[in-house]
Amino acid sequence: MTIVPVKDSWKNGTLLTRERYLDWYRRSVEDVEGFWREHGRRISWIKPYTVVKNTSFQPGAVSIKWFEDGTLNLSANCLDRHLETRGDQTAIIWEGDDPEDSRRITYRELHADVCRMANVYKSLGVGRGDRISIYMPMIPEAAVAMLASARVGAIHSVVFGGFSPDALAGRMEGSTSKLLVTADEGLRAGRKVPLKANGDRAIEISAKAGHQVEKVLVVRRTGADVPMVEGRDHWWHEERERVSTVSEPEEMGAEDPLFILYTSGSTGKPKGVLHTTGGYLVWASMTHQYVFDYREGEVFWCTADVGWVTGHTYSVYGPLANGGTTVMFEGVPNYPDAGRMWEVVDKHAVNIFYTAPTAIRALMGAGDGFVARASRKSLRLLGSVGEPINPEAWNWYYRTVGEERLPIVDTWWQTETGGILMTPLPGATDLKPGSAAIPFFSVKPELVDGEGKTLYGAADGNLCITDSWPGQMRTVYGDHERFEQTYFSTYPGKYFTGDGARRDEDGYWWITGRVDDVINVSGHRMGTAEVESALVSHPKVSEAAVVGYPHDVKGQGIYCYVTLMNGEAPSDDLKQELVRHVRNEIGPIASPDKIQWAPGLPKTRSGKIMRRILRKIAEDDFGALGDTSTLADPAVVDDLVENRQNRK
Ligand code: WT7
């Protein structure tokens, strides 16, 4: 296996040498409180904390608090405290969908706009503790909306602009949002996304379910003519002129909620992952600085949409907390062509580039010519996140994009973890393609077998984390029991990640993928249960089972077995209709890749669907179906194999 040893140039000027990492890591687990008492001071507190850590993973009593008696305001940390030293420095470089379209916003300008939006929120009757849903394209106003929410002490719930009205409605109901912040339209690859219209529809759906969204704040992006509801809807560009640029930040407790972000699990509806203020910000800023070896004045580009946690922590909060310059990109990697990312790197002299394996694979497929068209000479470091990166993609990223001169940090984490938990450190870790390497400070990973027995040394198992870190989620919004049930009951006393992993003989960690019914499609998390419930909500569908299968670009594709109602005839038209139906229910990211008509599903005698078998058939690996003797009707398997849709 290849190992890429740390190069001298990566060590040059780095904050974390190997020695310092080892020393700090040891202290971070042996003297957790002392370590964070010191590093918690990297952000500004109104009232300093005296208590550092107060956490329990014990079943029935799970409780996570960090810096609990400290007070602060997150937007003041990301903005006000930088004004004196870097008011005129660029905070956000915005690159539009159209290559001709870009903007630079200084810290002073961003501060003024956030204050204005905070004042608009207040004038709309939204403040401390209220929930704000944000359904926006990747434009600076999305960050402004988030920061303004933090400024007034509200709780934001960003909903990815690719989600359908139904999905948005469910999230607005779940968080009982008072306000929706959206735009007239989004713009991606030259195509318009009807955000305001979707928002209107979602508000109707919510109203039918008994939840009334009171106000809508609309940002003008494309200038489309969108209907405005008198008294409910307000234009940002009009309200902005009516308010002042002065807004006192609210003094918030460290454990006051900062945001909710919905994410898919193995069962039920998406969960509202809740993050709070103090610990999250310390973790975001600490990981952003050390994992990316971020240096004063550098341009940092995380390509993730603010609709995902990566966009929260590394497009907005981490870089701004550190007084950095962050790039927000509205478009997509292959528009106008597959050279766009590298063009943007040159155009804005990007130093650190952080993206997902699915994008790397897609660009790799487009050929090296697009990469060679740009100099990429500003780049100093590359990052990857979202799913395991296959060695082929890693090597292409390393050789072709990085010309073997740039380190790659393969960062493993989750919506739940708030920020990066495992990663190589550029100046400290030899790189192994595909390995997330080593734990960040205070992260204590552990492997357990199916029975929960701890595994030592080189081993393969289920990945748990045995103690808390400041960025950890605090609860499932409105359902603490579900929080305990989902994360702390499988292996009592431990946080279970849902991932499988391997620790090799050098102590390096390799994430092998989800071991639950969550699939990872283009770096986006999708609960198979969600797609199933979307399918069975179609009147012609009687039953559905959904599994993932290996997909060249997406990592995993969505494979659906569908049983129709008695008397319904299968047809290609019906397949198309079901695809459209799922897109309407959830959004384009949930589009089924394959649909197989299943006269019956393989079930045990007690009626449980045997997904293991369905996965094998979807993978075209049916030689290894294993034991099928416990099936109620073994013959259904023959039919499924016979009519499988994925033939390698
Ligand atoms: C799941 C979390 C964390 C931001 C993006 C996704 C998978 C994430 C890696 C990586 C292998 C990874 C895991 C994890 N994952 N990063 N570097 N190597 N797998 O956040 O939507 O909450 O998904 O993504 O399976 O559990 P998310």
Image: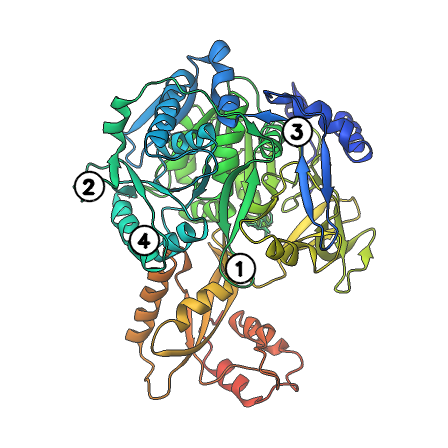
Q: Position of residue 34 (x, y in %)?
A: 77, 27
Q: Residue at x 46, y 35 (%)?
A: 154
Residue 69: numbered disc: 3
Image depth: mark 3 or mark 4 in front: 3
Foreground label between 4 and 1: 4
Residue of label 2: 230
Q: Left or right: where does residue 553 sit relative to residue 52?
A: left
Pick the front one: 167 or 462? 167
Question: Where 282 sits versus 465, above or below?
Answer: above
Do the residues bearing badges 4 and 1 touch, measured as CB atoms within 8 Å? Answer: no
From the top left corner, tell me how far across and down residue 57 is, in percent.
73, 49
Residue 384 numbered tag: none
Crowding around mark 2 (Cα neighbors within 10 Å: few <14, some 14 to 19, many 20+) is few
Looking at the image, tell me whether mark 4 or mark 1 is earlier in sequence order: 4
Crowdedness near tag 3: few (<14), some (14–19) or many (≥20) residues, C-alpha within 10 Å = some
Colour setting: rainbow
Q: Nearer the viewer, residue 623 or 32?
A: 32
Separation of residues labelled 3 and 2 (CA atoms): 43 Å
Mark 4–mark 1 distance (CA, rounded to whole Å): 26 Å
- Say which label, 2 or 4, has the lower sequence index: 4
Name which of mark 3 and mark 4 comes first in the sequence: 3
Mark 1 vs mark 3, CA separation in Å: 39 Å
